[in-house]
Amino acid sequence: MRATLTALLSGLVFGIGLVVSGMSNPAKVLNFLDIAGSWDPSLAFVMAGAIFVTSIGYRLILRRPAPEFASAFALPGRRDIDMPLIGGAAIFGLGWGLGGFCPGPAWTAISAGDTGTLAFFPAMIAGMWIAKTALAQKRALKTS
Amino acid sequence: MTEFTPFASFFGGMLIGASALILMGFNGRIAGISGITSALLPPAPPAAEAAWRAAFLAGLAGAPLLYQLATGPIERTVQSALPLMIAAGLLVGFGSVFGGGCTSGHGVCGLSRMAPRSIAATATFMAVAVATVFVTRHVIGG
């Protein structure tokens, strides 16, 4: 129960951060990516603010033996750079550049119900499910 | 044109960082939106694993409503061409899960840990996104 409440709080703060920073606005994201045109460097400041807080805070938190409401920190341990990583990131970048939405801002946009969001969001969920299924099959092939 | 907002953007970024610290400090989890979302899709995780993820996403989706109550309307311009937005959604959803993360998991949490996979992924999706906007706005659209 406590872990559910802290996750709710974390989601709320994340969403407020996206709105305050302007990152919840796809027009602002596309202008950030448009270096040769109507460049709006604001989103570099979003990343800087987020990484500034997270890099210092993680260092302090990860020194502790365990999180407050779980038995261990769940940290990705892989360090190899493989094709799914780079290919997936490239496909994500293509979609991000086309629509101006990445997953977080898409979640903060659904309550407003713009036509573009209502097209984007279910398609994003479908794309995630396809990738999840493909990765599970790949894993099954490897172990069999 | 959108207005350059360095202070609001830096402060909003710090809030995103605070959110990542809450989720790591209390739940021991990376605040990666694509990972949290896709874990809830079929085959769904056990109830205890699903609850915190659903709560996080409820907070994320509900945040703009709270913000609007406190301050007023949120500026948001979404492209309305349906085939474009459907294609963009499929690519973003597939690519972020296949690549193990998006702007939050790789871009914020991964870079903060100096994780080599996240550095490679972030450099890739930023470069491709910039190239995509260059092509759509200045080569095709120019």
Image (tube, rainbow, N blue to C red):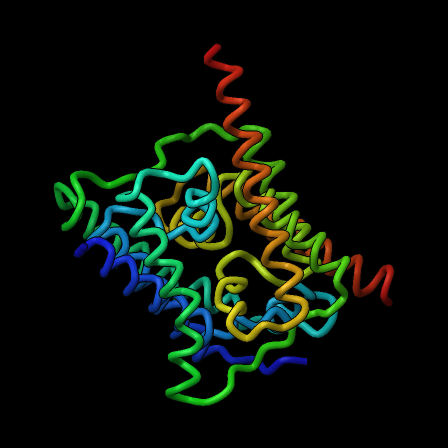
Q: Nearer the viewer, residue A98 or B86?
A: B86
**Residue B124 appears in the figure:** no
- Residue A57: x, y in percent? 25, 57
B133 left or right, relative to B19: right
Quadrant for the N terminus of chain A in the image = bottom left
Viewer-proximal residue among B13 and B47? B47
Above or below, A121 relative to A59: below
Identity of the residue drawn at 36% across and 54% down: B54
Which residue appears farthest toward the top when viewing the image? Answer: A144
| Tally of marks | 0
Q: Image point 59% across, 77% down: which residue?
A: B76
At x 40%, y 30%, the residue is A78
Tell me if I can see residue A91 in this picture.
Answer: yes
Left or right of A30, for residue A77: left
Residue at image position (73%, 69%) is B80
Above/below status of A16 relative to B103: below
Is residue A34 placed above or below B117 in the rendered structure?
below
Q: Is residue B119 left or right of residue A72?
A: right
Q: Name the spot of residue B128 as percent of width and height, x first.
A: 67, 49
Task: Say whether residue A62 is left or right of residue A105.
Answer: left
List x then y, in percent, for residue A43: 53, 68
Does residue A139 sit above or below A76 in this rendering?
Answer: above
Q: Position of residue A113 (x, y in %)?
A: 58, 72
